[in-house]
């Protein structure tokens, strides 16, 4: 199947392809590979085929279709669709079904996107390897001994293994970009506040943002454009006009971009040497075309991971208070008293990582430690934002590695202390901490010394400057 919506739409228009054929192609791939990869939790087979037939009928009557006709989409199991089970890959939601559809998803459906199923992920989007789902680990389609990254692992694998054309994920500290890097696909996280979070299950509300996984930047731009913009159900969404990202990306430009890279990131001891060398090679290619690539200092790098984990755990401990066996989903069947309802439901309903974060978050918010941890972390968050925005005053984007290594082995980091897993996020959390900057991962490379595993280059743009970031992304893709 074509790996781009525009090619698919051309064939649909020329009557060389039917929507039913597209959906059937993905359903067959799901059938063939999902048993092993475990990317999908639910497949909406009948519904997807019925919608495809409806679109084919409209096509044969020459009716105009929505802008996403032919787009077959998988959706991370933290984004609600009315009447469908939603679990956040946790046991605690039981058989709960969404009572409304997320604004972002509704906008895609309204443009004739077909939703093919819900995608497995780390429980409540907490993790960097997709080993924290209550419904089993997800495997990297290129090498099934490896993790796909997380938390949107199912979204990345579904696109990687062509089980759908594109997928929605969520990114609190890298959950779209890191799995994109590990699976060799494009991951785009727009600015915090660009897309409504209404209907997105909250992990850390001041960081969470919906993003896309796709085979190219054009599909990402179109999906982002359609999802973006103000929403009465989420007051944190920006009122700013949404640029036509897809049209702007399609425009030719001979602009010479100004690109910064953070010296402390490219020289970081945790960074794989092949990744480092590949990124410097790309920088040389861009320079040869007249773009500027310069080193800048960002001395706060070692503070990123601890600050991120203190703040997100704090927010998570509050957000996850609602799963108490009373309001939603599952309740432990043996609970008799009120205390038992809370205690047993939460003890058996949540997985280990989620409980760790609730405890960590409760601790850093407790009166005795609030100033030492939470207040201090908020101050550092501001310093990170100021320092990052200062760099972006002089440059269009900040470029660097998405991840310190290619996909690691299943079990490799999980058996170590949790800090090792958290450190996998060192390069991605900066965008979220620095006021929610837009960021993306481009699947530019294969690791020759490590099984040809893919890895990505990350770009961080200025707030609400997704268009510029996408254009720089295209320059990198074109020059390799
Ligand atoms: N790996 C990070 C975490 O565990 C990021 C997760 C995310 O972006 N949802 O918090």
Image: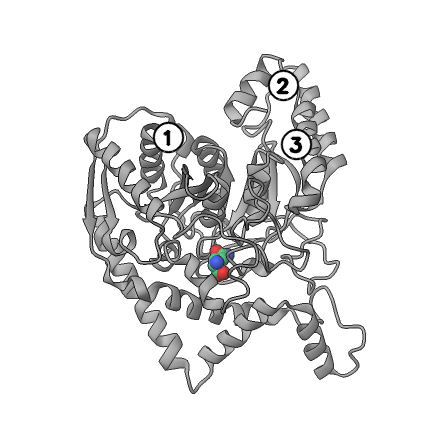
- Report the Cα–Cα distance between label 2 and label 3: 25 Å
* Among the two numbered marks 2 and 3 on one chain, the one whose residue lies closer to the N terminus: 3
Say which of 318 and 349 sits in front. 349
How is the model colour-coded?
one colour
Q: Quadrant of the C terminus?
A: top left
Classify mark 1: residues with Cα within 10 Å, few (<14), some (14-19) or many (20+): many
Judging by the rendered image, the residue that carries numbered circle 1 is 249
Rendered position, 164 above or below 180: above
Write the residue at 32% across / 66% down: 303
Residue 287 shows in the view:
yes
Q: Is mark 1 within 8 Å of ligand 1?
A: no
* Among the two numbered marks 3 and 1 on one chain, the one whose residue lies closer to the N terminus: 3
- Report the Cα–Cα distance between label 1 and label 2: 27 Å
Q: Tell us which disc is closer to us: 1 or 2.
A: 1
> Which x, y percent locates residue 97?
72, 54
Image quadrant where residue 381 sits: bottom left
Say which of 469 and 227 sits in front. 469
> Which x, y percent locates residue 388?
27, 55
Tell me the number on the disc at residue 26: 3
Write the residue at 47% across / 62% down: 421
């Amino acid at each position: 199947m074509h790996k781009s919506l525009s090619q698919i739409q051309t064939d649909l228009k020329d009557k060389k392809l039917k929507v039913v054929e597209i959906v059937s192609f993905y359903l067959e791939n799901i059938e063939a590979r999902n048993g092993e990869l475990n990317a999908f939790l639910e497949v909406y087979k009948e519904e997807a085929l019925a919608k495809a037939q409806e679109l084919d009928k409209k096509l044969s009557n020459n009716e105009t279709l929505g802008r996403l006709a032919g787009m077959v989409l998988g959706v991370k199991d933290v984004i609600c669709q009315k009447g469908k089970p939603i679990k956040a890959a946790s046991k605690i939601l039981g058989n709960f079904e969404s009572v409304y559809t997320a604004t972002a998803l509704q906008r895609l459906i309204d443009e004739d996107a077909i939703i093919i199923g819900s995608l497995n992920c780390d429980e409540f989007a907490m993790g960097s390897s997709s080993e924290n789902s209550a419904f089993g680990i997800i495997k990297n389609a290129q090498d099934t001994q490896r993790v796909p990254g997380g938390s949107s692992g199912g979204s990345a694998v579904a696109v990687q293994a062509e089980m759908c054309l594109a997928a929605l994920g969520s990114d609190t500290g890298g959950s779209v970009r890191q799995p994109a890097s590990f699976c060799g696909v494009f991951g785009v996280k727009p600015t915090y506040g660009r897309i409504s979070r209404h209907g997105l299950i909250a992990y850390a509300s001041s960081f969470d943002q919906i993003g896309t996984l796709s085979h190219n930047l054009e599909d990402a731009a179109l999906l982002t454009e359609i999802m973006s913009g103000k929403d009465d159900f989420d007051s944190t969404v920006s009122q700013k006009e949404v640029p036509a990202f897809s049209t702007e990306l399609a425009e030719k430009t001979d602009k010479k971009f100004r690109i910064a890279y953070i010296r402390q990131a490219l020289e970081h001891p945790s960074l794989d040497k092949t990744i480092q060398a590949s990124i410097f090679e790309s920088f040389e290619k861009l320079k040869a075309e007249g773009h500027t690539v310069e080193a800048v200092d960002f001395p706060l790098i070692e503070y990123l991971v601890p600050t991120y984990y203190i703040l997100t755990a704090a927010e998570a401990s509050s957000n996850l208070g609602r799963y108490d066996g009373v309001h939603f989903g599952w309740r432990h069947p043996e609970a008799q008293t009120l205390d038992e309802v809370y205690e047993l439901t939460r003890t058996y309903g949540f997985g280990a990582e989620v409980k760790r974060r609730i405890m960590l978050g409760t601790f850093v918010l407790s009166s005795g430690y609030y100033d030492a941890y939470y207040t201090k972390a908020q101050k550092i968050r501001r310093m990170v934002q100021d320092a990052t925005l200062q760099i972006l005053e002089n440059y269009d984007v900040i470029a660097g590695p998405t991840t310190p290594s290619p996909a690691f082995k299943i079990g490799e980091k999980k058996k170590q202390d949790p800090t090792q897993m958290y450190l996998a996020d060192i390069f991605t959390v900066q965008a979220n901490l620095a006021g929610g900057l837009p960021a993306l991962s481009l699947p530019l490379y294969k690791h020759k010394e490590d099984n040809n595993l893919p890895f990505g280059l990350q770009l961080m743009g200025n707030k609400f400057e997704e268009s510029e970031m996408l254009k720089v992304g295209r320059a990198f893709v074109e020059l390799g």
